[in-house]
Image (cartoon, rainbow, N blue to C red):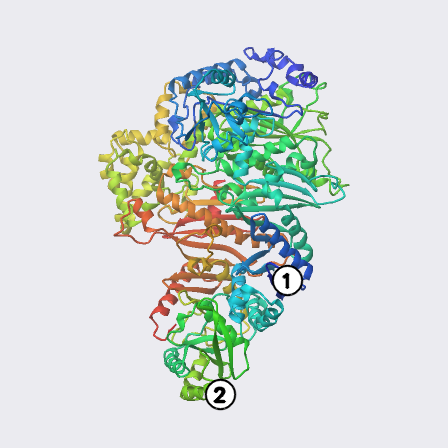
C-alpha cells in the first residue's frame, strides 16, 4: 500500500511539499508538474476532475483557499477516504500557518519553511492509514475521530481541567494519556472536533518536551488569529493541553501546573491503568468479542479496544494489531454508512450526488473466513465489534445490542 | 447486389432442392423462386441486415403496463394452430410444417383484423409545448444557398429521422435575435400560418407564404424532455444518426473518443491521433477538447506514480457530473463518457466492459473497429444506440417526478435469466437443439452434392429481455448479450411486439480472437468466418451464432443472410408459438412462483396482517386485485422450505391447503395468527366464486375428505389445471374446454406443465419473507432474479422502496465481494490487495423503512413497530465464483448457504 500527498501552489505550480507513506518511490518533480498540469488544463476547459480511480487506488485533486492544490494518490488496496485525508491535510496547514498566509502565498519559500513544522502531524495522519504501523506506540487509527479512553475518573479530572484552564486564563483544556483523550474541560466541545483532533496530534508530535507552547490557528473557529497551545507533560505518556492567550508566561504556567495537578497524581495513575483496555473495568464483555470500536458520533470520539478480557489469550487467534486493522477497515468501508453525519460535507450540491446514499441503514455486518464484524447504531453511539467466526449472527446481534445498552447505562462511562 | 443474390439462391438448399417441399402438399414453399424474402431489399452492401417490423404501430403493447393475461392476445390463433398441427409429422416437423406462408398470411391478416377492431389507441400524446414566432414579411434574409426557407425565415431546416418532421438546424446570424432564446436548434417546426408542415408539403406552403401578404407565423414544438428515441428506426437506419439525435446526445454529455497515441502511425493526421470521435463536430465534443488530460493521466499513472492505468474519472463539466472511462489498447486509448445521473460510476465500469466486448465481437479488436475503412457511420449508429439505450431512453418519465431510474443492478451484470419448470425448459431446449442440429437430411435427399453453408455453433433465446436458454459458450453469451442489450434489441422486444425481426452480421468470436495470440495450438479452431443471426417474433428474440468454413462451405466476400437459415430460425420460434410458449410465459412471468417473492411486504407486520384480514373479508374490493392474487400464492405455502421442494406437485393446491389447516390445528400457538390467512386466500382466489361462506369455515374444518359442493368443484378443477397461476387461467381453460380435445400432444404436454407449477419458496420460516434476490454467476454471464416487471406487478410503495434500497445496497456489497473473487482468481495479483477485504465473503445490511412509506401502505403510525429488512450478499467461490444477494424481512434469520442450495434446486 502507499499514499502520497502533494501540495502545489495553484497559480505558480511551485511544489510546496510532498509527503508519502508506504513502499512507493518518491514522486519526481516532473510528475508533480504533470499532475498539476492536468488539473490546470482541465480547469481551462471548464472541467474539474473530481476523482480518478485506478485499479486498487485513487487519484484526487482538491483545491483549497483558491491558492493551494492538494493532490492525493493512494494505491495497493488501501481503504481510506482520500478526500477526507486531503481536507485534514489542509486543516493541518491552516493550523500551523493560518489561513491568510495560505491564501496569499506571497513568499512561497518562507511558507515552505513554516510548513515544515507541521510535517510530524502530517506524517501522523498518513500513518493512521497504514495497517503496518498499528503496533507503534501512538497509533492514530481513524482520520476524523478522536481516539479516547473511557475511564471512571473522567468526571473528577474534568473539574481539575476546568480549574487549571481558569488559572491560566485559558479556555479549552484536555488530558491526554498515551495519545488518547481521557478528560476534557467542560467547554472543550466548543472546539470543532477536527480542531480537537489536531490538538491531540500536536501533543503527540511534541512528545518528550516537558512544557511547550505553540501558536496555532483554529481552522474553523479562528483561521486568521493565532491561539497559544500549551502542552505540559505531567507523567510519562500523560500530557495536559490548554489553549490560552499570550499570558501567563511559560514559567508561570509551570508553577500553576504544579499547584493544580499535584493532588491529582493518584487519580491520573488510576486512569492510566485503564489503558490499553480503554473501557472501565465495570464494563464486561462476552468472551467471543475479540475487539471493539465504540464511537460517540456527536463528539466524534471513538474508543478502540483489543484487550477486552483480563485473562490474556496470547498466542491464540490473530494478533491484536490485526484485530484493530480489521475493525478499522470495517468501519471505514462499511460501518461509517451507519452515521451519515460523519461524512464529509461538500458544498457543491452536484458533487454530493456522487455519494449515492442509501438511507436508514441501522446494522451491518461482514462474515469473513476468520472472523465476523458487526456494527449497530443506537442513537448517538455506534458500536463495531469483532467476533470469532464461529459465533452465529443472531447471537452477534444480541451481544452487540447488549454492549450498546451497557454503554448507555453504565455510570462509569463518561464521554 | 444482384451478384450475391443469385449466388444465394443457388446455394440455398431450399431452392436447389424441391423434394422436401413436395412432402407436404399445402406448403407454399414450393414456389420459393418467386418468394423473395421481404427483408431482401434491406440487405446492406456489406451483407449486413437489420429488418424490423413491429406489430401494429398504434398498439403500445407495453408489457410492463399490462401484466394481465387478457391483454396479451389469448386465443386468436387457435384455429390456425389446429390446422397446422394436424399436418405435423413427427420427424422434422419444425422445418416442414411451419414454413407455410399461406397459413402465416392468414394468421397475420386475422390478427390485424382483430387488433384493428379491438384496439383503442392508447398512445396519448404528451403535453406538447408550442412556441409561436411571427417573422416580419418585410425582412428578407440573405441566403448563401439561395434557399427559400432561409430567405423567408432566416433559419435552415432539416428532416427528422422519421423522414417527415422538420427540425431547426441552424439560424442565420441576422435572424438569431428573432428566435433565440425561445426557439433552439433541434426544435420541430410544426405549423406555418396554422397549417401543419412536413417535408412533403413544405414547398407548397412556402409558395403560399410568398403569395400571402401577412407576416408568416411559425409554430415550433419543443421536443419533450422525456423524449424517447425510436429505437426501431435507429436500428434500421444505415446512415449516420441525424443531427437532432446527435444534438441530444451532445446535450446529455455522452461522448466517445478513440485516440491513437503512437505518434509515428498517425502523425500526419490533423487531429493528432484522434481516430474516432462522437458526437461530432470535434470542437464541440468536451471529451475531444479535454483529451490531453486523460491521455497524460493514462501515461503518467503507471509510469510515474506506480499505480495501474486509470479506469474511471469523475469530472464536473457544465455543472453535470460525468463519468469518463478509460480503456487502453496497446498504445491507444478509448474514452467513453456518461452522465453520472443515468450511468453512475458503478454502472459505467460495467457498461464499458460490455462496450469493449461488443466492439471486439463486431470488429475483432478495438483497433480494427476504429481503423476499418468507411466504418464511421456504422460506429456512429452503434454508439448512438448505446447511448440512447443507456441514457436517453432510461430516463424516467414525468410521472415519476422526473426522477431518474438509472440502470438496474441486475441489468448491468449479466444476462437476466429466469427459472423455468423442467418440462418447459426441455421444450425450449429441444426446439433450439433441433435448430442447432441442422439435420439436413430433413431438407434434402441429395446429401452427397449438398454442402451446408453454416454450422450452428450455438444459440440463445430471450423472452421479454429475459434469457430463457443459452447453448452458447459463456464468453459468446456475454458478447451476444452485450450486443443485444446495448443495441436496444432486447428492450425493443420487451416494449413492442415484433412482427418480424431479422438481424444479420459478421462477428468475430471470442475463441478465435484469443487463439490468434497463442498460435500453434493443436486444437485450434479453423479459420473461418462467423455470423450472428438474430430473429425475433412477438417478445421472443433468438440469436444464433453460425460458422462458415471448416466443414461447411467457405464464405467468400460479401455474405448476405441466407433466406433458408433465416427461416430455420423463424420456424424455431414458430414452434415455440405452436406449443403455446408465448401464452405460457405470460402467465409464468406474472405468476411470481419460482421462487416466490413477497410483493406485499406490509403483510409481514402485525398491523399488516390485520389489514389483510379486513381486505379478505371484502372480496369484491377491486382496488387491489393484482396484489391480492399474488399474495394469495404467498400464503399458499407455509410448510418448511425443504419439505416443499419434494412435494409432489400434482396435488399441490390441496397439499398446501392441508398443511395450512394442519398448522392451524397442530400448533395452537400459531392458530391465532394463521387462522386468518386461509380466509384471505380463498377470497382472493377467484372472485366468481362467492367465498364468504367458505372463508368463514375454512380455517377449522377443511380437510381433503370433506370437500363438497362448489368448493370440491373448484378443487378438482384446480387439480386439473391452474395450481400455480391465478384466476386468469381458469377463465382460459373454460374458453378452451370445447375445442381442447383435438390439441396436439405437445400443446397438451405444455399445458400439463402449467398444472405442475407450484410456487416455491427458498427462505426459511413460516411466512415468505423474501422480497427480492439476485443470483449471479459472473463467469457464465448469467444471473437469476425475479422478472423485471415484478415491481409493476407488485404495485406497492413499500415494495418499490425495498427493491430500490436493495439495488443500491447490492452495488456496495458487490464491490466489496469483488476483492475476494479477484483474490481467488489471481493468486499473485500484480497489485497488492487489501488483506482484510479479500477474506470477506458475506456482507449484510439491515435497513429500516421510513415511517412515511409505511403509512402510505396503510400501516398507521400509532402501532408502528420498526419495519426492518436485510440486504445480504454472499460469494460462493467454488467451483467458480457465484454471488447471491437476498432481500428479506428481518423476522426470520436466513442462512445464505441454505438459500443458495434451495435455489439451485429450482434451476
On the question of residue B182 being in view, the answer is: yes
Which residue carries the number 1 mark? A14
The numbered mark 2 sits on a residue in which chain?
Answer: A
Residue A10 place in picture, x, y as percent: 59, 59
Q: Residues within 10 Å of mark 1 (few under 14, many from 20)?
A: some
Judge from the rendering whether residue B182 lies leftward or rightward of residue B881; answer left or right.
Answer: left
**Above or below, B126 relative to B894:** above
Q: Nearer the viewer, mark 1 or mark 2?
A: 1
Location of the C terminus of chain A (image quadrant) = bottom left
Quadrant showing the N terminus of chain A: bottom right
Q: Nearer the viewer, residue B84 or B264?
A: B264
Question: Is residue A292 visible from the viewing direction of this image?
Answer: no
Q: Mark 1 or mark 2, which has the lower sequence index? A: 1
Instruction: Kindly state the secondary structure of the residue where label 1 is placed.
Output: loop
For residue B735, the mark is: none
Residue plotted at (55% across, 46% down):
B323
Q: How many labels does the image show?
A: 2
Q: Do labels 1 and 2 share a chain?
A: yes
Q: Which chain carries label 1?
A: A
Label 2 residue SS: helix
Mark number displayed over residue A251: 2
- What percent of the width, then of the height, locates residue B117? 38, 17
Where residue B352 sits: x, y (%)?
Answer: 59, 43
Q: Residues within 10 Å of mark 2 (few under 14, many from 20)?
A: few
Mark 1 in CB contact with mark 2 (< 8 angstroms): no
Residue B663 sits above or below residue B171 on the image: below
Which quadrant of the figure has residue B478? top right
**Mark 1 to mark 2: distance in Å?**
41 Å
Q: Which of B704 and A121 is in front in this view?
A: A121
Q: Where is residue A99 in the image (x, y as percent from the top left)?
A: 51, 66
Q: Which of A406 and B204 is in front in this view?
A: B204
Amino acid at each position: 500500500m502507499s499514499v502520497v500527498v502533494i501540495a502545489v501552489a495553484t497559480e505558480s505550480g511551485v511544489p510546496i511539499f510532498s509527503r508519502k507513506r508506504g513502499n512507493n518511490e518518491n514522486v519526481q518533480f516532473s510528475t508533480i508538474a504533470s499532475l498539476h498540469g492536468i488539473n490546470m488544463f482541465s480547469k481551462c476547459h471548464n472541467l474539474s476532475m473530481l476523482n480518478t480511480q485506478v485499479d486498487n487506488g485513487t487519484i484526487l485533486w482538491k483545491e483549497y483557499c483558491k491558492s493551494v492544490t492538494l493532490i492525493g494518490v493512494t494505491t495497493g488496496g488501501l481503504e481510506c477516504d482520500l478526500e477526507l485525508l486531503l481536507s485534514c491535510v489542509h486543516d493541518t496547514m491552516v493550523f500551523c500557518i493560518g489561513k491568510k498566509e495560505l491564501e496569499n502565498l506571497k513568499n512561497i519559500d518562507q511558507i515552505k519553511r513554516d510548513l515544515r513544522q507541521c510535517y510530524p502531524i502530517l506524517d501522523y495522519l498518513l500513518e493512521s492509514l497504514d495497517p503496518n504501523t498499528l503496533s507503534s506506540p501512538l497509533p492514530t487509527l481513524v482520520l476524523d475521530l478522536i481516539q479516547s479512553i473511557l475511564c471512571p475518573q473522567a468526571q473528577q479530572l474534568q473539574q481539575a481541567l476546568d480549574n487549571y484552564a481558569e488559572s491560566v486564563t485559558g479556555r479549552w483544556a484536555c488530558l491526554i494519556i498515551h495519545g488518547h483523550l481521557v478528560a476534557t474541560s467542560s467547554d472543550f466541545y466548543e472546539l470543532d472536533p477536527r480542531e480537537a483532533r489536531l490538538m491531540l496530534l500536536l501533543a503527540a508530535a511534541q512528545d518528550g518536551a516537558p512544557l511547550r507552547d505553540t501558536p496555532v490557528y483554529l481552522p474553523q473557529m479562528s483561521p486568521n488569529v493565532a491561539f497559544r497551545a500549551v502542552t505540559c507533560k505531567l507523567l510519562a505518556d500523560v500530557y495536559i493541553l490548554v489553549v490560552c492567550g499570550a499570558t501567563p508566561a511559560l514559567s508561570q504556567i509551570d508553577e500553576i501546573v504544579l499547584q493544580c495537578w499535584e493532588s491529582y497524581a493518584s487519580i491520573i495513575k488510576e486512569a492510566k491503568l485503564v489503558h490499553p483496555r480503554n473501557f472501565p473495568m465495570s464494563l464486561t464483555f462476552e468472551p467471543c468479542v475479540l475487539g471493539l470500536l465504540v464511537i460517540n458520533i456527536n463528539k466524534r470520539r471513538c474508543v478502540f479496544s483489543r484487550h477486552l478480557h483480563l485473562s490474556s489469550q496470547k498466542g491464540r487467534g490473530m494478533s491484536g494489531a490485526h484485530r484493530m486493522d480489521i475493525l478499522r477497515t470495517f468501519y471505514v468501508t462499511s460501518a461509517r454508512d451507519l452515521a451519515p453525519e460523519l461524512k464529509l460535507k461538500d458544498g457543491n450540491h452536484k458533487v454530493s450526488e456522487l455519494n449515492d446514499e442509501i438511507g436508514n441503514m441501522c446494522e451491518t455486518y461482514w462474515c469473513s473466513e476468520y472472523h465476523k464484524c458487526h456494527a449497530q447504531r443506537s442513537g448517538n453511539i455506534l458500536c463495531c465489534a469483532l467476533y470469532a467466526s464461529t459465533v452465529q449472527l443472531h447471537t452477534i446481534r444480541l451481544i452487540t445490542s447488549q454492549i450498546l445498552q451497557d454503554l448507555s447505562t453504565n455510570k462509569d462511562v463518561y464521554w | 447486389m444482384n451478384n450475391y443474390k443469385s449466388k444465394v439462391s443457388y446455394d440455398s438448399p431450399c431452392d436447389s432442392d424441391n423434394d422436401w417441399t413436395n412432402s407436404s402438399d399445402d406448403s407454399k414453399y414450393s414456389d420459393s423462386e418467386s418468394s423473395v424474402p421481404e427483408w431482401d431489399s434491406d440487405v446492406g452492401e456489406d451483407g449486413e441486415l437489420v429488418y424490423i417490423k413491429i406489430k401494429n404501430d398504434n398498439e403500445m403493447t407495453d408489457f410492463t403496463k399490462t401484466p394481465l393475461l387478457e391483454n396479451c392476445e389469448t386465443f386468436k390463433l387457435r384455429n390456425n394452430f389446429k390446422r397446422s398441427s394436424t399436418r405435423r409429422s413427427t420427424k422434422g416437423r419444425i422445418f416442414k410444417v411451419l414454413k407455410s406462408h399461406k397459413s402465416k398470411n392468414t394468421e397475420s391478416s386475422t390478427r390485424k383484423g382483430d387488433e384493428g377492431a379491438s384496439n383503442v389507441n392508447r398512445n396519448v400524446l404528451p403535453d406538447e409545448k408550442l412556441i409561436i414566432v411571427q417573422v416580419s414579411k418585410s425582412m428578407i434574409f440573405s441566403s448563401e444557398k439561395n434557399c427559400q426557407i432561409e430567405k423567408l425565415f432566416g433559419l435552415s431546416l432539416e428532416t427528422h429521422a422519421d423522414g417527415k418532421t422538420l427540425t431547426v438546424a441552424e439560424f442565420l446570424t441576422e435572424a438569431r435575435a428573432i428566435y433565440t432564446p425561445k426557439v433552439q436548434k433541434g426544435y420541430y417546426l410544426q405549423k406555418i400560418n396554422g397549417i401543419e408542415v412536413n417535408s412533403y408539403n413544405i414547398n407548397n406552403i412556402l409558395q403560399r407564404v410568398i403569395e400571402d401578404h401577412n407576416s408568416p407565423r411559425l409554430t415550433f414544438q419543443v421536443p419533450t424532455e422525456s423524449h424517447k428515441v425510436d429505437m426501431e428506426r435507429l436500428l434500421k437506419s444505415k446512415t449516420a444518426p441525424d443531427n437532432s439525435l446527435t444534438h441530444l446526445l451532445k446535450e446529455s454529455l455522452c461522448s466517445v473518443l478513440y485516440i491513437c497515441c503512437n505518434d509515428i502511425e498517425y502523425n500526419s493526421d490533423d487531429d493528432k491521433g484522434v481516430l474516432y470521435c462522437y458526437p461530432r463536430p470535434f470542437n464541440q465534443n468536451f471529451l475531444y477538447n479535454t483529451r490531453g488530460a486523460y491521455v497524460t493521466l493514462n501515461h503518467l499513472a503507471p509510469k510515474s506514480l506506480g499505480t495501474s492505468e486509470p479506469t474511471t474519472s469523475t469530472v464536473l463539466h457544465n455543472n453535470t457530473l460525468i463519468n469518463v472511462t478509460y480503456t487502453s489498447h496497446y498504445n491507444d486509448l478509448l474514452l467513453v463518457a456518461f452522465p453520472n445521473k443515468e450511468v453512475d460510476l458503478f454502472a459505467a465500469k460495467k457498461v464499458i466492459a460490455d462496450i469493449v466486448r461488443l466492439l471486439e465481437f463486431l470488429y475483432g479488436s478495438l483497433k480494427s473497429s476504429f481503423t476499418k475503412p468507411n466504418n464511421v457511420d456504422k460506429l456512429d449508429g452503434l454508439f448512438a444506440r448505446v447511448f440512447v439505450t443507456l441514457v436517453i431512453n432510461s430516463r424516467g418519465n414525468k410521472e415519476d417526478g422526473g426522477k431518474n431510474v438509472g440502470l438496474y443492478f441486475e441489468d448491468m451484470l449479466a444476462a437476466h435469466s429466469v427459472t423455468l419448470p423442467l418440462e418447459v425448459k426441455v421444450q425450449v431446449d429441444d426446439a433450439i437443439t433441433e435448430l442447432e442440429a441442422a439435420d439436413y437430411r430433413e431438407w434434402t435427399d441429395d446429401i452427397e452434392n449438398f454442402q451446408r453453408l453454416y454450422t450452428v455453433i450455438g444459440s440463445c433465446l430471450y423472452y421479454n429481455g429475459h434469457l430463457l436458454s443459452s447453448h452458447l459458450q459463456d464468453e459468446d453469451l456475454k458478447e451476444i448479450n452485450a450486443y443485444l442489450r446495448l443495441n436496444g434489441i432486447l428492450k425493443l422486444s420487451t416494449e413492442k411486439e415484433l412482427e418480424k425481426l431479422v438481424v444479420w452480421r459478421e462477428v468475430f468470436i471470442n475463441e478465435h480472437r484469443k487463439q490468434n495470440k497463442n498460435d500453434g495450438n493443436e486444437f485450434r479452431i479453423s479459420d473461418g468466418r462467423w455470423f450472428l443471426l438474430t430473429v425475433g417474433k412477438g417478445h421472443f428474440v433468438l440469436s444464433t451464432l453460425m460458422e462458415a468454413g471448416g466443414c461447411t462451405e467457405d464464405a467468400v466476400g460479401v455474405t448476405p443472410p441466407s433466406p433458408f437459415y433465416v427461416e430455420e430460425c423463424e420456424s424455431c420460434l414458430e414452434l415455440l408459438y405452436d406449443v403455446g410458449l408465448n401464452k405460457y410465459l405470460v402467465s409464468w412471468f406474472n405468476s411470481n412462483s419460482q421462487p416466490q417473492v413477497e410483493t406485499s411486504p406490509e403483510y409481514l407486520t402485525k398491523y399488516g396482517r390485520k389489514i389483510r384480514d379486513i381486505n379478505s373479508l371484502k372480496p369484491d374490493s377491486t382496488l387491489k386485485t393484482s396484489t391480492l392474487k399474488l399474495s394469495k400464492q404467498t400464503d399458499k405455502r407455509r410448510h418448511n422450505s425443504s419439505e416443499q421442494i419434494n412435494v409432489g406437485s400434482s396435488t399441490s393446491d390441496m397439499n398446501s391447503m392441508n398443511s395450512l389447516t394442519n398448522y392451524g390445528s397442530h400448533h395452537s400457538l400459531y392458530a391465532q395468527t394463521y387462522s386468518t390467512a386461509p380466509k384471505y386466500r380463498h377470497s382472493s382466489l377467484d372472485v366468481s366464486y362467492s367465498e364468504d361462506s367458505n372463508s368463514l369455515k375454512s380455517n377449522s374444518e377443511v380437510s381433503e375428505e370433506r370437500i363438497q359442493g362448489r368448493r370440491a368443484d373448484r378443487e378438482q378443477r384446480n387439480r386439473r389445471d391452474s395450481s400455480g397461476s391465478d384466476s386468469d387461467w381458469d377463465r382460459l381453460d373454460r374458453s378452451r374446454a370445447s375445442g381442447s380435445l383435438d390439441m396436439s400432444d405437445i400443446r397438451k404436454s405444455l399445458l400439463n406443465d402449467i398444472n405442475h407449477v407450484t410456487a416455491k419458496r427458498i427462505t426459511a420460516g413460516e411466512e415468505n419473507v423474501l422480497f427480492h434476490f439476485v443470483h449471479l454467476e459472473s463467469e457464465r454471464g448469467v444471473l437469476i432474479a425475479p422478472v423485471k416487471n415484478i415491481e409493476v406487478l407488485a404495485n406497492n410503495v413499500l415494495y418499490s422502496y425495498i427493491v430500490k434500497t436493495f439495488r443500491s445496497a447490492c452495488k456496495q456489497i458487490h464491490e466489496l465481494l469483488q476483492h475476494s473473487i479477484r483474490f481467488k482468481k489471481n493468486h499473485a495479483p500484480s497489485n497488492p490487495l487489501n488483506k482484510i477485504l479479500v477474506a470477506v465473503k458475506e456482507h449484510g445490511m439491515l435497513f429500516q423503512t421510513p415511517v412515511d412509506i409505511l403509512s402510505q401502505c396503510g400501516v398507521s403510525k400509532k402501532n408502528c413497530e420498526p419495519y426492518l429488512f436485510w440486504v445480504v450478499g454472499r460469494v460462493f467461490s467454488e467451483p467458480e465464483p457465484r454471488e447471491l444477494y437476498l432481500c428479506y424481512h428481518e423476522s426470520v434469520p436466513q442462512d445464505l448457504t441454505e438459500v443458495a442450495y434451495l435455489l439451485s434446486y429450482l434451476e
